[in-house]
């Protein structure tokens, strides 16, 4: 998006592998990687049924209307 923000695209875990912590691990790795690259904020257009997942990981809804709500998360940058 710009030097301080990045957009998260498709995040998916196979149905038979859901609720086992894989999504949390994936997002933790993504956030760590982004932070090391100097990204300060992540943005995602989430599926409505994924809003709770992102909320549990500290993401905030910034735009609830529309088919895919927009959420954001501020990151700590650095190593």
Image (cartoon, rainbow, N blue to C red):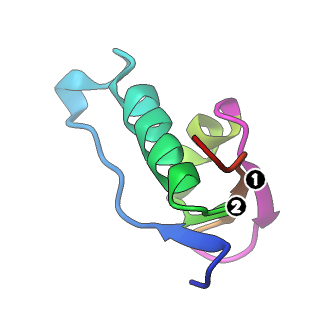
Residue identifier under label 1: 74
Residue placed most toward the observer, 69 or 23:
23
Q: Is residue 60 above or below residue 17?
A: below
Residue 4 x/y as whole percent = 67, 73
Of label 1 and label 2, which has the lower sequence position? 2
Name the residue carrying label 2.
40
Label 2, secondary structure: give it. loop
Mark 1 or 2, closer to the camera:
2
Which of the pair 55/2 is nearer the observer? 2
Q: Quadrant of the N terminus?
A: bottom right
Compared with 13, 65 (above or below) is: below
Q: Is residue 15 left or right of residue 47?
A: left
Return the residue found at the far top. Answer: 20
Give the left or right position of residue 54, taking residue 31 as reference: right
Q: Are marks 1 and 2 in contact (CB under 8 Å)?
A: yes
**Disc 1/disc 2 C-alpha distance (Å):** 6 Å
> Residue at coordinates 39% horizontally, 18% vertically from top-left?
21
Residue most toward the front? 79
Percent x, y of residue 51: 62, 47
- Location of the C terminus by quadrant is top right
Q: Which residues are magenta?
A: 56-67
- In the depicted view, which residue is nearer to us: 65 or 45? 45
């Amino acid at each position: 998006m710009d030097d301080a923000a990045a957009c998260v695209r498709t995040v998916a875990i196979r149905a038979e592998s859901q609720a086992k912590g894989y999504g949390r691990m994936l997002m933790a790795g993504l956030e760590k990687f982004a932070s090391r690259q100097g990204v300060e904020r992540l943005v995602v257009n989430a599926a409505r049924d994924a809003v709770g997942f992102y909320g549990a990981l500290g993401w905030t809804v910034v735009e609830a209307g529309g088919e895919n709500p927009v959420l954001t998360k501020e990151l700590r940058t650095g190593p």
